[in-house]
Image (tube, coloured by chain):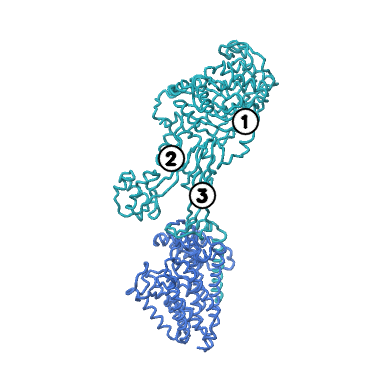
Chain colours: A blue, B cyan
Amino acid sequence: MSRSIKNIDWLSILLFLLLIGFGWVNIYSASYNENAQGMFDFNQVYVKQGLWILLSFVLIVIILSIEAKFYERFSSVIYVISLVSLAGLFLFGKKISGATSWYDLGFINFQPTEFAKAATALALAKFLSDIQTNLKQFKHQLQALAIIVIPALLILPQPDAGSALVYVAFLFAMYREDLPANYFIVGIAGILLFVFTLLFGAIWVAVGIVLLTGLFLLKNRRKKPNYFKWALTAVVGIVFVFSVDFIFHNVFEQRHRDRFNIVLGKEVDPRGIGYNTKQSEIAIGSGNWLGKGWMQGTQTKGNFVPEQHTDYIFSTVGEEWGFLGSTLIVTLFVFLLLRLLFLAERQKTQFKRVYGYSVVSILFIHFLINIGMVIGILPTIGIPLPFFSYGGSSLWGFTILLFIFIKLDAERMAY
Amino acid sequence: MKKLLLPIVIIITGVLFTGRLFYLQIIDSSFTAMSMDNAVKIEYDYPQRGFIYDRNDKLLVSNQPSYDVMAIPRDVKVFDTLELANLLNLSTEQLIKQLDKAKIYSPRLPSVIVSKLTKEEYAYLQEKMWKFEGFYIQKRSLRDYEVNVAANVLGYISEVNNAVINKNPYYQSGDLIGRQGVEQYYEKILRGVKGVRYIQKDRFNRDIGSYKNGKFDTLPQKGKDITLTLDIALQAYAEKLMKNKRGGIVAIEPATGEILALVTAPSYDPSLLVGRKRSKNFTRLWYDTIAKPLFDRSLLAMYPPGSPFKTLTGLIALQEQVVDSHDKFACYGGYRYASSRNAFMACHHHNSPLALREAVAVSCNAYFAQTYLKVIEKYKTPQAGINAWEHHLESFGLGNYLGYDLPIGRKGKIPDADYYNRKYRYPTYNWYAPATISNSIGQGEILTTPIQLANVTAAIANRGWFYTPHILKEIEGQPIKDEAYTKKNFTSIEPQYFDPIIEGMFDVYNYGTARFLQVPGIEICGKTGTAENFAEIGGKRVQMTDHSIFIAFAPKDNPKIALSVFVENGYWGSRYAGRIASLLIEKYLKGEVTQTQREEWILSHSLEEEYAKFHPEKEVKEEAKPSDP
């Protein structure tokens, strides 16, 4: 224990503490209520969050006290428990604001989704670090995919598409562990075609694909390309484009379409579905260089941004701390992610490296989707900003996720 | 590559976010405005509007509290609809309809249910309001008129329209602004400056405290009281005399240019445009296109000045030294100004030959036609002659805006060389002085407004100068210092040339056209006018009964009042306008009227039958005239 404390990466912990502290300050502002009964009024959101933060310190001590080997050895057990807790929601779950994502433990509501990420990361790390696993093999690719997809499929029907989407993050970790790059290329091409189809319509994108393929083949005709392969690729692309068009217009519900259209700038509807994004942009945009000052945000005080203390907490930062404060937060996140990535790379065992990569990938996806949504460049997908958003389960989930890795890293010399 | 993908994606994301934040927070400033719009409510403290007094410190316009019954639909509890409806003078259906409307507007915000209750209604209602939860009474300030005259001078106030709001950022929807008269012209002085309070709102538009602890709040500044040059007793008397007549009267104090009376007939009671019945009354006045009570004839009506203009013809002839005051001209019942058969200007029977003073007294057409021709023909070309003549008239404030401190006006019309060149298509055709001969007697192309002619009278009374007529005397007891009204304007006529004209105008009362209008004890100088006028009736140009015109000032030495009176279709100068002018002068100088017979005659004579001729298809109904309550 004493040796591992010496080896603990205090920089990561400092960044973690800064984010948590600054997060609480903003939750305080966003949820401040003049009728509060002092600092121990447990009806107040910021008081509760303060309590979760204090308790998370207890959690940290526990996590750091357990031997690192425990996490590796019991990863499968933890994973299975986590899957069971997710499945149990179908029977015993409590519905809060439309999603059956909670267990009612009487004194506290508990959200297993937030803990499943760490469990899945452990399981994936365990599987990939197996000496027999080779991600170049299709069979192993499928097995790894199963580890990721099962919890996602259990989360999806809660419904909580946002949290399910987070599991895409593990692709980064798998790519690091020799998953062929083609998956990424196909994935990125798919996303690009999707966006272009929505923006310009299927016909034009199809025409574009044909033209580009034609040009490419014409230019490289001396190299004797495989014409059949390229033509097939183009056809698959075109089929994809038209199916996107079909799905978007015939399978998606209007609210889904709206979310995309708002981000693509196709609809301006401040009273309807675009209200959240619009209000969030107004709050952030009115912050200017230095912001309106802590507790001075007019949008924040007026509760114009819905869910401001949870998913939209970053809009408070934007309004009250301005460009300076919000870029500081972005920078802190980027620093933390890069620091953890550095730690992951220096691990001697594959298990620790995969786990580290998974931690970084999950935090990154949350960071990307949450802030991207709040500043209006991604569709509305409700997932919390790590360490920042209000919520005991999410705070604890991220704390566990992070500190297991810090513990693993601290004991890297033990082997 | 494997190791680089994630860090690169992370850094790109960081840069992208920073760029987007930079755009939202620094580049695009529209969000700040939107934030102010939806999160900060601005509340205004409206200061009391300034009072308006007449020259003798008689209060004309003050303020009265008015009470609006408001309701916040969400707070409205079950209540006795019938009782409240009765209290508010509404039917139960109307009350429920109002409440529904308010609910649609906003369940959380107050809406007006009934506006502009009087003090009496309020006093009665107030005792019962406790029964009706969710309703309350809000106080506002309305104008209170202490007099029922001078509506055209005072103007009125009403809610600003969008055009004003777009042009002037001071005004918000629902603000009151002065319209017409001094309310409009001295709006800024009268209104004061409203105070502003910024209030933080939540997303339901509820107040949740003062924005930034009142850092940006300002206190209201009270509107200033103003004193007008008007003599309200004279004004009221003039309006009384103009009953059943149409036209305009303007009285000016020559020594100061102060407007003593500014009368248009028909007019209306200014309190018609206050309170609950305002919009109904306004619509009625607005659509009275026959009598046009909202049309200020004293400032806007352009009439041919007729014979009073001969005084100017005489003055110009003297100044141009084409005649002197002793030169006599013959009048053979008129004057043949050109060889053609129709080129004859008729005159009435009088002594002949005659010099300037007598010509003014008896209003001889022939005399002024000849002197006018001499003026024009003094110059090498008729163009130069007309321009010289026009230049003199301009110095009397004719043919252009006078520059008085009221928001409306007309230029009138004095033709110049360009005008005749266009009319006679010069240089294809030539034209000569006799073609403009009607100018000599104030007919033809010349048009003046009553205030212009009153100003000419004042300039004659002053022997060659005038102050720009004005209606404002003092602001909060401090005399005005505006140079526009405190600097003498000199006419192009030298003072000595005024003597024969003034003597002639004096003789108008001694033995001339107004000899039977004398007022014992007052030496009045005047000049009658009878102007031909035409109207288009049923598509035909028809000559109507002549306008009755009169200008006068008194006393002859050290004049205290100069005025012009126009009475539309009043037959001839002394019949209506002359009588009214004499009565007003007596009233102003003596404070009472001794010529009761004359007064009775005017009060009992109506010209409505004449006016009915303009609208042969319509009967002019007495009750259609809001000016005659």
Residue at 55% from the left image edge and 20% from the top image edge:
B528
Q: Whole-percent x and y of residue B579?
A: 50, 22
Tell me whether the residue at label 2 lies in contact with that at label 3, contact meaning CB atoms closer than 8 angstroms.
Answer: no
Instruction: Tell me if residue B481 comes above or below residue B241 in the rendering.
Output: below
Which chain contains the residue that carries disc 2? B
Residue at x-position 48% and y-position 80%: A403
Amino acid bearing label 3: Lys
Decide: is A406 above or below B107: below
Precedes in sequence: disc 2 or disc 3: 3
Asked whether disc 3 touches disc 1, contact meaning CB atoms under 8 Å apart, the reply is no
Residue under label 2: B274
Question: Which residue is under mark 1?
Answer: B466
Residue B222 screen position, x and y as percent:
52, 47
Q: Tell which of B557 and B568 is nearer to you.
A: B557
| Percent position of residue A322, x then y | 54, 64
> Does residue B131 sit above or below B564 in this rendering?
below
First in residue order: circle 3 vs circle 1: 3
Q: Amino acid at mark 1?
A: Phe
Residue placed under numbered mark 3 in the picture? B194
In screen coordinates, is B541 left or right of A151? right
Q: State the SS at label 2.
A: loop
Q: Is residue A211 visible?
A: yes
Q: Residues within 10 Å of mark 2 (few under 14, many from 20)?
A: some
